[in-house]
Image (cartoon, helix red, strand yellow):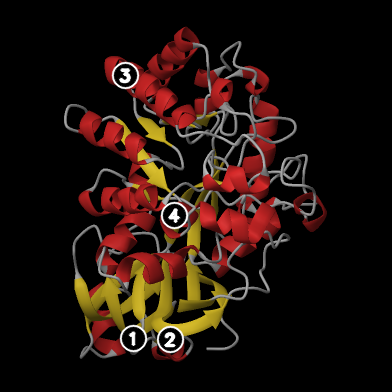
Amino acid sequence: MLYITNGYLIDPKSGLEGVRNILINEGRIACIAPAECSLAEIIEQSGLKVDEKEVDQIGQINAAGKIVAPGLVDVHVHFRDPGFTYKEDIESGAAAAARGGFTSVVLMANTKPAVDNVETLKYVLEKGQKTDINVYSCANVTVGMKGKELSDMETLSRMGAAGFTDDGIPILDEELLRMALRKAAELNKPVSLHEENPEYITNNGINAGKAAAHFGIGGSPREAEISMVERDIKIAVEEEADLSIQHISTKEAVELVRRAKRHSCHIFAEATPHHFTLTEEAAIKHGTLAKMNPPLREEEDRMAIIEGLKDGTIDMIATDHAPHSSEEKAKPITEAPSGIIGLETALSLGIRELVIPGHLTMMQLMEKMSLAPAGLYHLDAGYIAEGAPADIIIFDKDAEWIAGNFVSKSGNSPFIGQRMPGVIEYTICGGKIVFENPEK
């Protein structure tokens, strides 16, 4: 058992906000009570039978002055396992997630071998079950991510795939995508799509604008994203299939999603912390450490993403945690792989860029980072209530830390050395403390 006292509870599902005591038993929340309730009273209220000896053994956390919120949920991460475990593996990725306050993650399927078969899916899920957090995985939409043949979506769904994606590669065959969305709708599973048409792109990862000019390359224009988003929304609406637009980067794509949502409940979008924090100026400053797909765009795009988060056009925040080795990121701008790590800085960036400036309340940020992503993937997560899984974070929104010394195997981040608000003191998953800040 675990007893959390005096924490400022924020629950985006019920809207409950205020100082509460929480009793956890056997991995679930047994009771939530006002702060003035004693442990004896909360045990009696819970209906649990606990003798005096057991009461003395209950672990306690005094969360006075701290926020107690649902464990964060990230539905877009790359743990590089199998195939690229020198960058990250499921164990190290899960540890980084716990350090960042995430208790549930959904892995992308662009591994080697790809998650287009039951054997690989089983490997990933079984390895994930041995970690301290909840690890789910998508399966591929197409065999080998080649965009030519659908995977056995029905069998993969039955074996535990949380959704379907070929993230990293767009699905160019319109009829094949239509078939995939139709099948996903039958299975009640979301499809998440990487929206960049390679026909427009000269060099990926760098915006075709000021940044590309700085490096003397062609870059990746906004039209690459806009064209795919427009096409794929149309198909998803027609097929009544849940579609998530991944890591949205342009103001035009935000507006396309906004318009679609007026007529359909099947269109969703995610924003990364780096896209609502940085612009192409960061790519000029940090080089390959700020190279990602889709690229960082202009200030108008960044503000459009923030506005989309504010008005509900963009449903969720997802990190697109993409580890790479320092040797890979040391390559020239056109050769280095795209992507940055994000699990350990996401909450802090949300507080710094969204809550402190007044764009979102803390309640709204928690909804974007827990309840909404959990809802899209039908996960029992993202809320705090009696009987719910005891997946909880406790953090000090006012304390600060310096980004760096990451738990992830990789350190490819443009935020290293920056002062960040929001220090996570505890991450609790299934009632078990899976991260405890040694400096609290």
Q: Secondary structure at mark 1?
A: strand
Classify 10 Å Cα crowding around label 4: few (below 14), some (14-19), many (20 and above): many
Which of disc 2 and disc 3 is earlier in sequence? 2
Please give the residue where the numbered disc 2 appears in the rendered image.
Answer: 61
Disc 3, SS: helix
Q: Is residue 379 visible?
A: no
- CB under 8 Å between callouts 1 and 3? no
User: Which residue is identified by label 3?
Assistant: 234
- First reached walking from the N terminus: tag 4 or tag 1: 1
- Helix, strand or loop for disc 4: strand
For this view, does 144 lie left or right of residue 188?
right
Q: Nearer the viewer, residue 243 or 437?
A: 243
Callout 2: few (<14), some (14-19), or many (20+) C-alpha neighbours within 10 Å? Answer: some
Q: Which mark is residue 73?
A: 4
Q: Pointers 1 and 2 in contact (CB under 8 A)?
A: yes
**Please, what is the three-letter code of the amino acid marked with disc 1?**
Thr
Q: Which mark is residue 5?
A: 1
**Nearer the N terminus, badge 1 or badge 3?**
1
On the image, the x and y values in percent for residue 107 come to 57, 43
Image quadrant holding the N terminus, namely bottom left
Residue at 50% x, 27% y: name it. 157
Quote the CA–CA distance across marks 4 and 3: 28 Å
How much space separates mark 3 and mark 2, taking CA atoms? 50 Å
Q: Write the residue at 42% across / 23% down.
A: 227
- Direction from residue 193 to residue 167 in the image, left or right: right
